[in-house]
């Protein structure tokens, strides 16, 4: 299952946005208001939970500066990754899109598609405000 966010304009250079997304501590600024937990596990990993949802652990898997930051699930129970693709549009501006890829059975995919789409929209909307 693949879900893409809309492409947003960010008032940061591609390099600055890539650096921002590579620092997992910054994801707290992008999270929805209904977050019930955000905890750093290491310099490259964190766990978060939204009200009514299970905890999700993410870690930085790959940084291809200044164009891409990939995070992946810490647990093998729910295998997925979240990638931020960045495109330079000016010296202090860039465009970004988030892509969620997960390997789920059809029933699970149907249940989580809506919440994940909404979550990605919140992340990119908050990124747009940076």
Image (cartoon, helix red, strand yellow):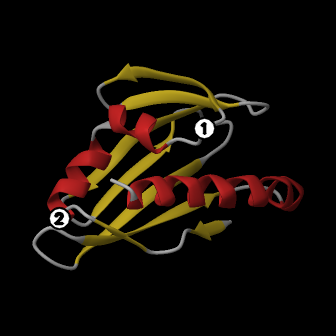
Q: Is residue 66 above or below residue 108?
A: below
Tell me residue 20's x, y (percent).
Answer: 26, 47
Mark 1, Cα crowd under 10 Å, few <14 / some 14-19 / many 20+, is few
Looking at this view, name the residue that lies furthest to the bottom: 89
Looking at this view, name the residue that lies furthest to the right: 107
**Which is nearer the N-term, disc 1 or disc 2?**
2
Q: Is residue 30 above or below residue 122?
A: above
Helix, strand or loop for disc 1: loop
Mark 2, Cα crowd under 10 Å, few <14 / some 14-19 / many 20+, is many
The quadrant holding residue 3 is bottom right
Tell me residue 60's x, y (percent).
Answer: 36, 41
Tell me residue 109's x, y (percent).
Answer: 79, 59
Q: Is residue 129 above or below residue 21?
A: below
Q: Find disc 2 in the rendering and name its residue.
A: 13
Q: Nearer the viewer, residue 44 or 98?
A: 98
Q: Residue at x 43, y 58 (%)?
A: 83
Report the mark closest to the observer, 1 or 2: 1
Q: Is residue 82 left or right of residue 104?
A: left
Q: Is residue 124 left or right of residue 111?
A: left
Tell me residue 73's x, y (percent).
Answer: 54, 40
The answer to whether marks 1 and 2 mark residues whose Cβ atoms lie closer than 8 Å is: no
Q: Find disc 1 in the rendering and name its residue.
A: 33
């Amino acid at each position: 299952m693949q879900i893409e966010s809309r492409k947003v304009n960010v008032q940061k250079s591609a390099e600055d946005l890539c650096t921002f997304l590579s620092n997992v501590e910054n994801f707290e600024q992008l999270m929805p208001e209904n977050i019930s937990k955000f905890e750093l596990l290491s310099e490259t990993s964190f766990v978060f939970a939204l009200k009514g949802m299970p905890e999700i652990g993410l870690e930085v898997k790959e940084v291809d500066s200044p164009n891409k930051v990939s995070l992946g699930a810490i647990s093998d129970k729910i295998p997925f990754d979240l990638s931020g693709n960045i495109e330079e549009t000016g010296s202090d501006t860039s465009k970004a899109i988030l892509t969620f890829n997960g390997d789920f059975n059809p029933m699970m995919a149907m249940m989580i598609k809506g919440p994940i789409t909404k979550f990605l929209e919140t992340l990119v909307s908050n990124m747009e405000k940076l």
